Image (cartoon, rainbow, N blue to C red):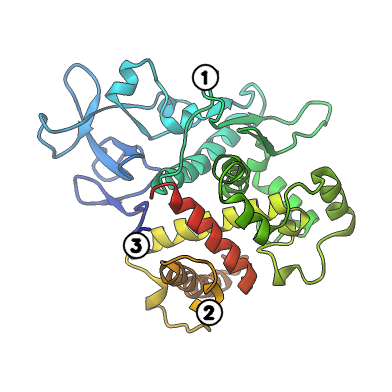
Amino acid sequence: MPSFQTPLTPRAYSCACGRPVFFRNSECLACRRALGYDAHRGALLALDPVRGGGWRQAGVPPRRAARYVRCANLTSAAGCNWLLPAAESQAGHSLCLCCRLTRTVPDLSQPEAATWWCRIELAKRRLVSSLVGLKLPVVPKTADTDEGLCFDLLMPAADGTPVITGHANGVITLDASEADDARREQRRGELGEPYRTLLGHLRHETGHYYWQRLVEHTAWLEPCRALFGDEREDYAAALQRHYAQGAPADWWQRFVSAYASAHPWEDWAETWAHYLHLVDTLDTARSFGLDGERVELSYERFSEALLHDSGDPDAGGFLHLINSWMELTGVLNELSRSMGVHDFYPFVLSGLAVRKLHLVHRIVHSTDA
């Protein structure tokens, strides 16, 4: 398994002019040089145009520089700053890997649709960059790749019929109105959720997808049943019960969130989302020289005794990850309170929730063994 002292997906970048640039930038605001993100290198590159078309990384001798094409969605409402290798363009692709995952774009003739699409794609690019950095399979769903992944971003119907956000056999459907901050906050309050974001939705739904890819027909199924429960429990009945009765009073002792208590599949998806939260946030912190080990805040650390029966020879590496997370988020919560906003991380992790996160961690890193 990899070391977590260095980021899996770096988040700190600089332009050829030396100024800092950021993940969403398509142009350096200081020198106006074009920028593009290479997902497979995990790098935001300063670009120079190539004679005859295309782009190459600035500062690299032309004979050694890879050639790129900028995603066609750069000039659409999606505003994508990702790059395609020239070979993909020659194979007929005009969209980057992340944009090719979107099967259905919101109806852009509708009010707010373009703004919502832009926000969703920005969150999706953050998600996909992490998935690629973790070396997870990210393959667009096509007629000849049934195991692939795609996103349908749908507008609410004119008659008020709601769009149901969810996953089915590699198709993630998202209600595009979740990109409306006011509506999303209203729903968060109505459902009593401490946390609700576009990125959180996307991470949760990919958890259902990766259950099918990494768990369902593998040797990991029985270990998952032992920790998360038997997913063969009637799913529709479990959700109906959850919405009628709510989570059990002691849910926090066993689950990462109240919704995770609804059904083993939801427990897995919520835990998966939490794992992506912590890995990407720690990657970002470490990219800028900040680590939970360096903050002036001491928590009672999770010990190896918690994972003694896991059979994982690198349990200590995971414990370093989770303990760094707890210390970092403690400080970030205090910073949020200083600004008078919701806690950055409004959750408390029990020992059992950490054991579940550890199993997700092991499954994720078994894919690049």
Mark 2 vs mark 3: give the one in front: 2
Element class at badge 1:
loop
Q: Position of residue 139 (x, y in %)?
A: 47, 31
Above-or-below relation of 207 to 169: below
Q: In which quarter of the image is residue 83?
A: top left
Task: Tell me the distance, in whole angstroms, between the alpha carbons under discs 2 and 1.
Answer: 47 Å
* Label 1 crowd bin: few (<14), some (14–19), many (20+), radius 10 Å: few
* Label 3 crowd bin: few (<14), some (14–19), many (20+), radius 10 Å: few
Element class at badge 2:
helix
What's the residue type where badge 3 is placed? Ser
Task: Residue at 36%, 39% (x, y): give it.
Answer: 39
Question: Mark 2 sits on what residue?
Answer: 305
Task: Residue at 14%, 40% (x, y): give it.
Answer: 59
Task: Residue at 51%, 40% (x, y): give it.
Answer: 124
Question: Mark 1 sits on what residue?
Answer: 144
Q: Is residue 333 left or right of residue 19?
A: right
Residue 339 in view (yes/no): yes
Q: Which of marks 2 and 3 is nearer the N terminus?
A: 3
